[in-house]
Image: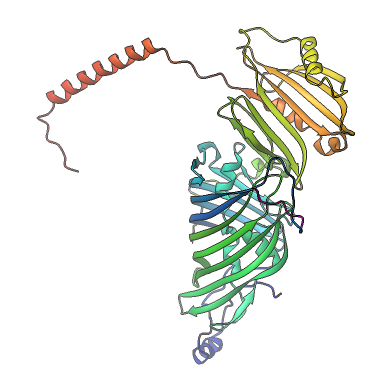
Amino acid sequence: MCKTEIAFQPTRRQILAAVVSAGLIASSRPVIASQTDGYKTKTFRARAIIKLNGEVHLKSQISEAVDAKGRTTIARKAPFQSTVTLDFEENSQFDNGFIDCTSLLNVVEASSDIQVDRHLTKTTLREECQEVVRFSRTSKRLLTTGLNAPMFTAEVNLIELPINCTFLDEIVTKKQVKVTEKWSLSDALTSRLLSLDAIRDGELVACLVDADSDVAQIELTGKINGVVAGIRTTIEVDGKAQLDRKAGEIIWFAANVEEEREISERAPGYKVLAQVQIRKKQIDALTSGESLETVSNRLPSIDSASIRQFQSDLGHFRFIADSKWVTFRDNGEEAIYRFIVDNARIAQCIVTNMVDFEPGRQLSMDGFVADVKTSLSGSSAIVRESSEKVTSAKMRAVRVESHGRVKDVDVIWIHYHISNDEGRRAVLAFMLNADDAEVFGAEDSQIVNAFELINWPKKLDSQAVEQELAKSEKEKATETKADATTSSVPKISR
């Protein structure tokens, strides 16, 4: 596979030769190199609209059936459609053949409407997360995180497009090519462009289809079998790009991107067609006034970049945890979270809301130990240790760790009773195989330290509501009278 490169700077003799050779690309100035050993930086603004249509593939919650190739069988399919709008500015730097990359994004707009079956979900990026950092120091895809606050997984998904705009300019070759001539993208570039961890086979091929002194038209096609977080995925691209030859950048890109991803422990599988439209233009600086240089001392580490915000709007609690945690179920009374590493379930956490105590009352450690023993009766579990502390979120947490065996497997249970001074309380129950204790590490401690109980919404007082409505009507009548007094003032037509 040949390396991806970019358009050349011709001599006068080459320009004359180009006139003779039909369709020859000849740039009047050098453009950004696709692969160099030098350090590169660029700043641009992009607006992308992505429309997705397809189906979500769900597995059975009872059967672990797999097909002849070892893939999880599909128990149910659900129709899926979505529209994503993303408008952002980006200041990026990368080196070492796309391996080392850092980008600072100033997000102007990010929203999505997602419908699965008849369930509609709307997501908008929160104001505190409009400054976004994307970076990598490994061959795997870029990590996305908020500069000022942890992001929800749904917010991260808003930023991670099917085509990564950071590397869009790199599809252009610096070799001298004629109309209809093709060149292949490197695996490194393809992985970055499609946000893959690895490529098993296939390639993306670019072709010059037309060119004049100002712009060049490029087609990008190909089929890739790749891997994302250990999950096999197939991506087929059929796209067109427009190169501004004087600016040396791709200013427009549109493509149909078909993707089929297998079911994993972390998420359902899917088969989807994404219609991607991107407009992009170089700018001098981010309008926020920030740059990678000005925020260099605030950039997150690789470990902190994987932290995500979790919140139960039904259960009225929140916490931050590693992105390897995924929400499995949440009905308000009980929420289930799973810790997935390399597509293997390492641990599970069940959060259960308990009946409120009166303010100031707390459950004793001995009382909670007794409750845990009762819940584990019949499993030959033995309480190994118990402790009590006040967390970083100012919650009182009682911890009980138990060990036992279930179906000849050594199991560890870690129970927490978390409460606040207002009487709100919840129980967190972690369960994992003893063999996975090292991989699990202190995940329970991180979640509990950040765990917050949000007070229940206040119940509506019907009498107070009626009084408020009457007050509102009186104020409205007063405003109407005032408007009538000033009605002689000419109105400006709009």
Please name the residue shown 76% across and 33% down the image: 443
Left or right of 405 on screen, residue 489: left
The image shows residue 142 at horizontal and vertical percentages of 66, 52
Residue 5 shown left or right of residue 22 in the figure: right
Q: Is residue 92 magenta?
A: no
Residue sitting nearer the eye, 395 or 227: 227
Q: In percent of the image, x 53 and y 68: which residue is there?
A: 239
Query: So how many labels did they put on this image?
Result: 0
Q: Is residue 24 above or below residue 115?
A: below
Residue 24 on image: x %, y %: 53, 84
Q: Is residue 152 above or below residue 313?
A: below
Farthest-out residue, bottom? 20
Quadrant of the image for the C terminus?
Answer: top left
Q: Is residue 366 depicted above or below 340 in this figure?
A: above
User: Is residue 244 visible in the rendered structure shown here?
Assistant: yes
Give the colouring mode of the picture: rainbow
- Indicate left or right for 436 with 239 as reference: right
Name the residue: 33% across, 13% down: 466
Q: In front: 480, or 245?
A: 480
Does residue 42 appear anywhere in the picture?
Answer: no
- Residue 171 occupies which quadrant of the picture? bottom right
Query: What predominant SS class does the magenta segment belong to?
Result: loop
Range covered by the magenta-colored residues:
70-75
Residue 318 point in image, percent of width and height: 62, 28
Does the segment drawn in magenta span residue 73?
yes
Q: Quadrant of the N terminus?
A: bottom right
The image shows residue 110 at horizontal and vertical percentages of 49, 46
